[in-house]
Amino acid sequence: DAGVIQSPRHEVTEMGQEVTLRCKPISGHNSLFWYRQTMMRGLELLIYFNNNVPIDDSGMPEDRFSAKMPNASFSTLKIQPSEPRDSAVYFCASSPWGRRQGTEAFFGQGTRLTVV
Amino acid sequence: AQSVTQLGSHVSVSEGALVLLRCNYSSSVPPYLFWYVQYPNQGLQLLLKYTTGATLVKGINGFEAEFKKSETSFHLTKPSAHMSDAAAYFCAVSRSNYGGSQGNLIFGKGTKLSVKP
């Protein structure tokens, strides 16, 4: 398996522009997570989905942030409008869901977002 | 509510020396605990985890960690450091422990390990 695939790896955009980050989870994993990593706040969970349904979005910082999972193999995180303080590395992770051992999360390589 | 504290944002050891990275947690339920490693410009890779059972957990690359409930600790050790161990290490606790996914995590701030030749 190719693992969790995120695109783009790097994104530079101007303040006020819309940014869309993409994630393809590992096939068969039905939980998907979006994390943000910054120097100041470390790794924070933004939102997660089970079976394509958003379960907890309490970590989404503002209404400018939105996430969707239209099917089991694709998710997006959108920021509109973007601001310089949104600059961070955004990680997508996926895991199986169920009452079993071995349901840890696997992380993608991240998207480094810079808003200028 | 759960939380994770990693003592020491930077740790430097000599090649061949013992590696000890400290992690203390707070949890209102029996915790599921994890150590992840992040190499520069990479994602996070699971080193090891504790859910139930044996409290000494062995992971990849020669690392191990011991769950000590009385001390609320889950320190990461490796007997002999290698240059390739230089990376950032993150301790995490799962928000739930009743099954389901183990991806809903609270992370510590991380410890950057440097290995001197």
Image (cartoon, coloured by chain):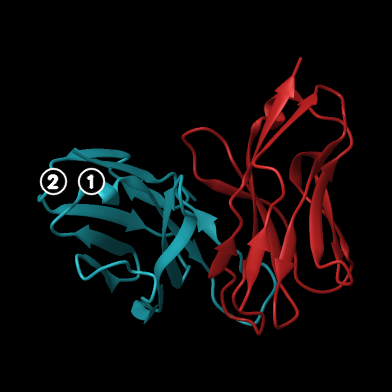
Chain colours: A cyan, B red
Left or right relative to A114: residue A38: right
For this orientation, the residue located farthest to the top is: B117
Residue designated by label 2: A15
Left or right relative to A69: residue B61: right
Amino acid type, label 2: Met
Q: Secondary structure at mark 1?
A: helix
Amino acid type, label 1: Pro
As rendered, which of B93 and A76 lies closer to the eye? B93
Left or right relative to B64: residue A33: left
Instruction: Determine the chain carrying the residue at label 2.
Output: A
Place residue B23 in its image quadrant. bottom right
Structural crowding at the residue carrying mark 1, measured as other residues with C-alpha within 10 Å and reported as few (<14), some (14–19) or many (≥20): some
The relative height of residue B20 versus residue A27 in the rendered view (above or below) is above
Residue designated by label 1: A84
Left or right relative to B11: residue A33: left
Same chain, labels 2 and 1: yes
Q: Residue at x 19, y 51 (%)?
A: A83
As rendered, which of A107 and A13 lies closer to the eye? A13
**Marks 2,1: beta carbons within 8 A:** yes
Q: Residue at x 49, y 51 (%)?
A: A1
